Amino acid sequence: MIVREYEKDEITVHRAPLILMGGIIAISLVLTASVTLGFVPKQSVPAEARAAAGIGAAQVRSLKFFDEPDGTVRVEDGASREVLARFGEGEGGFIRATVRSLVHQRRIRNIGPEVAFTLTEWENGNLTLADPVTGRSVEVSSFGPDNRAVYQNLLPAKGGAR
């Protein structure tokens, strides 16, 4: 059996990285404590933020979504039953995803499609798709301008024509 003896080397670490790592840990602990103790809000609830800022609804439209046998999604005005849009297979992915998430909540609660969803454009330009039955909503504007435009096209044109 071969046994090697190693000289005892001193392991040195520079002070600057240790001080920086300690600072990062200290900042993390301070931020975590400030959220835990309520000095910093845990999350922003869009409805509360709008209410605090006094932002009201600029436009509201009720919408109903239907799956057709050929895979097309039909979007209708909830009041007039006017067909606003149709999205064939492979189209309207964002509409399908957002509506499915809201419909899923209805299915969990055994609620049918009788009540229309509400699409609201706020005075600050943001859009919200809400389910008045479950209280759930999707802040459509959070998903970028292209996805926002898909829902914007479902609202009446400015000036009332549409």
Image (cartoon, rainbow, N blue to C red):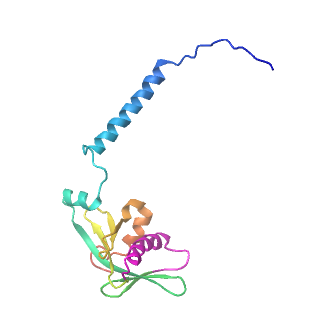
Q: Outermost residue, right direction? A: 1
Which of the 4 image quadrants contains residue 149? bottom left
Residue at image point 32% right, 82% down: 115
Q: Position of residue 93 (x, y in %)?
A: 50, 71
Residue at image point 57% right, 17% down: 11
The residue stretch that appears in magenta: 86-111
Total labels: the figure holds 0
- Whether residue 108 appears in magenta in the rendering, the answer is yes
What secondary structure predominates along the stretch shown in magenta? helix
Which of the 4 image quadrants contains residue 1? top right
- Quarter of the picture containing the C terminus is bottom left
Q: Nearer the viewer, residue 1 or 52?
A: 1
Q: Position of residue 14 (x, y in %)?
A: 50, 18
Q: Nearer the viewer, residue 160 or 140?
A: 140
Q: Outermost residue, front direction? A: 1
Residue at image point 49% right, 73% down: 92
Q: Nearer the viewer, residue 46 or 153?
A: 46
Q: Is residue 39 above or below residue 1?
A: below
Q: Position of residue 29 (x, y in %)?
A: 36, 36
Residue at image point 46% right, 69% down: 94
Q: Position of residue 139 (x, y in %)?
A: 35, 64
- Whether residue 128 appears in magenta in the rendering, the answer is no
Q: Outermost residue, top direction? A: 7
